[in-house]
Amino acid sequence: VPICGLTNAVFWKADMDIDCDGKQTTQCNLTADPDYQNQTAAVDSMGNPLDSANLPYVVVPGKSARFDSADAGLAHGSVILVLYKNQIGYAVFGDVGPSADIGEASYATALELRVDPNPKTGGVDAPDVLYVAFTGASAVAKPIENHAQAVSVGQAQLAALLAH
């Protein structure tokens, strides 16, 4: 999947697998998701793993020869616009996945976009999801678990992007 650059953003179009990692909840646990891990690369302001069931976040590929999120200007908490079937959601960069894999988002991100959030059977199989990751310090939601802050930052970043 090509990762393309814009002024103050990078974007890609991919599928959406459901990531249920982080805080254990009724929706996200080893029974619900055989690949469940009780940690995320990013942590909340209290140092705890993110809550996939309640916090919209996106998994960004790990560093490779092809892509390095830090070199692209992304940090944990960077806001990512996720667009699927005319539904816009805002999420944060909350976890890191395999360097050769792209197109994964939290249970809460799927819910926000009206996608089946079940980690075993849900998600979007076709590369029909657009991810626009805003770059730079002004694109980071703080604290990372404040979704209203992520939405506010995302809307401001989108307005700035469209103004170019």
Image (tube, rainbow, N blue to C red):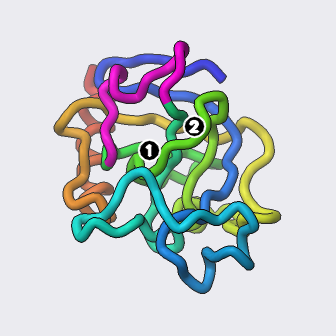
* Mark before the other along the chain sequence, 2 or 1: 1
Vertical side of 85 occupied by 119: above or below? below
Along the horizontal axis of the image, is 47 left or right of 96? left
Along the horizontal axis of the image, is 72 left or right of 26? left
**Residue in view at x 79 percent, y 46 percent:** 125
The label shown at residue 81 is 1
Secondary structure mostly seen in magenta is loop
Along the horizontal axis of the image, is 95 left or right of 130? left
- SS for dot 2: strand
At label 1, which amino acid type do we have?
Leu
Q: Position of residue 22 (x, y in %)?
A: 49, 66
Q: Which residue is mark 2?
A: 130
Q: Using the numbered discs, state the Cα–Cα distance from disc 2 to disc 1 in whole angstroms.
A: 8 Å
Task: Please state, as top left, top right, bottom left or bottom right, where the C terminus lies in the image.
Answer: top left
Task: Please state, as top left, top right, bottom left or bottom right, where the N terminus lies in the image.
Answer: top right
Does the segment drawn in magenta span residue 147?
A: no
Which of the 4 quarters of the picture holds residue 121?
Answer: bottom right
The crowd level at tag 2 (other Cα within 10 Å; few <14, some 14-19, many 20+) is many
The residues colored magenta run 63-76
Q: Position of residue 77 (x, y in %)?
A: 31, 49
Q: Position of residue 122 (x, y in %)?
A: 76, 62
